Each structure stands twice: as structure tokens, then as C-alpha cells.
Image (spheres, rainbow, N blue to C red):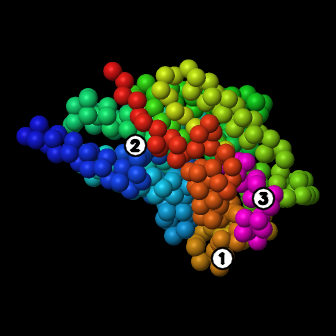
Amino acid sequence: MKRETSLVLVASFLMVSMTASTSVAGNNVTSFNVLGDSSVDCGENTLFYPILHHNLSLIPCYNGSDSTLLPHLLAKKKGLPYPPPFYSQNGSINGLLSGLNYGSAQATIMNPSSQSHQSLNQQLRQVFETFQLLQLELGEGSAKDIIESSVFYLSFGKDDYLDLFLQSSSGVMGKYSGLEFASILVDQMVNVMRDLYDANVHRIICMGILPLGCTPRIVWEWRNSTAGDDEGKGCVAEVNELILQYNTMLEERIINLNSELPNAHIIFCDIYQGIMQMMNNPQYYGFEDPKTACCGLGLYGAMIGCLSVEMACERDSDYIWWDLYNPTKAVNALLADSAWSGRPLFDICRPISVRALVFTTPSHSD
């Protein structure tokens, strides 16, 4: 009976493979797995999210739908369904074959002081639990084929800076300089990419952190504390410099990983530079208001976050920011197009585009 079940599941995997290759001709990806924070999760994968969310923005996505988020838009370009939340599993192995979203709103790279938010390492443990389940049900060979045919998407760091550093909620700011803090975070991200590689994941998309110094809440807080924001475009230079330190260090380490690890294909996607291009020339990209949140109240829509979608503006496509810290779907759509093809925002993903990564033939190690 177990052998028959395994054969059915292997057949299902082959069907997933055929679907992927026919949806986008030549696509070599059959499984798309996502780890991250509110950039990948609208709250349904975070236990007790409405109760435990502390940044006064309870609606990080339009109507609670993941369809506005960057990895969702990239999944469509791959010809794959968006992976369902990890906590929505019904125990079926068949449901794991095309990937899962392990992401959790407010997730951090460093272990959080509160157990209500899942860290990077907690999500990684869930990934390895999934791998073990595939091995038990399908056998090591078939499970290995599925894993090697997968792409993993990592998007972390924003909440580390918001919760652990900028707000100094755990005294981190008094312990570390900006460079030291960035180094700690990057080391942990690199360790996770190494762990995934050792588990036969060879294709990884690693996202940088967006320009937090331009988000409505940060600009509003800085204005209140300094009697005026920084740069003319409405961004706080000191905060953006911290983010640039992290992004630059992460990209350098990814370059080293690609050189060091045989058959590794890891790309860094620089959404910081992508969004800054929009901030610097908003009308060119179709935005009318680069400073204010579409959904929120007060100056810049940042005094009170998006408690209800009824608070939202009429035309979110006119705005760069959806709420306190998250971009609109229009911004994510531009980033997705650019990450996939390199246009209209040139080379935000390096050394190759997501499209090139997807069409890279997965290496099958012995």
C-alpha cells in the first residue's frame, strides 16, 4: 500500500513538472518555496496575528490577499501556483509538491524576544520537516529530485531593523554599531543559504531590504523628533545608510557563495535601488504621491496604520506606499517585471535575472 501511495505521489510530481514546463516553455522549476516576513505573508501564516501585531497596520495586503505581494507576482511569471501557507497544510504530501509559503508577518532574522513572531531559523526548521516528510513518503531519490528542482525565495531583515535596531526595543542599538548589526544579520542569512544548499537546494532568490528611510512611518517619526525630515524626496538618510550597509554586505557574500559552492545559483535582488528609482522620478513610473501611505491616517498616512481597507485611498496605483512600511501592488508589479526580465528597472537582480534562474537546468548531484 505504501509503495502504491509513493507511485501516485511521484506521478503527481511529474504532472507538476509538466505543468510548469508547459506554462512557461523551458521552465525548470517545479517547486517554489517562500520564507520571509510581511513582504511574503498577509498574516494568515502567523498565529494570532491580529492580536499580536504591534505596528498598527493590520492589513498589510489588499483584502488580506497575497496576490499583491512580490513573490506571488513572480510565481505567476514562473507558471506556478502561489505556494499555500505552511499552517494551512491538511497533511497531504501531494500538497507539498509545488512548494509552501513558510513566511510569517513580522518575522526576523535574529531570534525575537517574543515567541509570537517566527524567526528565520524557525521557518528553516519547518522547511527541513517538509523535506523529511517527502523523504519518508517518496524515498530519498524522488525527494531529492523535487528539492533540486525547486527555487527558494528569502525575504528578511526589514523587521530586524524596525523592531530590534531602530526602535531599540531589546537594547540592540546600544550593543552594536550599524556595521556590526548588519554583519550579524548577514552571517545568519548566509548560514541559512549554506544549510539549504547542503540539503540540495541550489537555486535561491535572496531579497535585499527596501529603503526603510523612505517609508511613511519612519519619515513621520523622524519629522516629529528632528523638526523636519532629511532629503528633499522625503527620505531619512541615516536610516537608509543602515539599510545600504546590510544590502551591500549581503550581495558581496552571495557573490562569494556562488564562487565557493559548486552548481549554486543564488541571486540578490536589490529592491532598495528599484524603489529609490521610483522615489526619485515618481511621475515617470506613474506615481502621483511618493511620500504618503495609501491606507492610513494623519501626516503621510503614518500616524495610524491601515486598520481597515475602508481607510484606503481610491487609486492605490497613484501611491508608492500602501501602509506604514509596505509598498503598493503597483510598486510590487514593477519590481516583479524588473526582477523577471531586467526591465524597466535594469539589473535589480544580480548576477542574473529571475527568469534566467528559472531556466537554469537544476544540477543533480550524486
Residue indicated by mark 2: 28
Placement of the C terminus among the 4 image quadrants: top left
Type of amino acid under label 3: Met
Distance from the alpha carbon under mark 2 to that under mark 1: 37 Å
Residue at 69 percent of width and 38 percent of height: 247
The magenta stretch spans which residues? 271-289
Dot in front, 2 or 1? 2
The image position of residue 236, as x and y in percent, is: 83, 51
Which disc, if any, is residue 315?
Answer: 1
The answer to which of marks 1 and 3 sits earlier in the sequence is 3
**Label 3: element kind:** helix
Q: Position of residue 81 (x, y in %)?
A: 39, 56
Q: Per the image, is 213 magenta? A: no
Where disc 2 sits, the SS reads loop
Q: Which residue lies furthest to the left in this view?
A: 1
Q: Residue at x 65, y 72 (%)?
A: 316
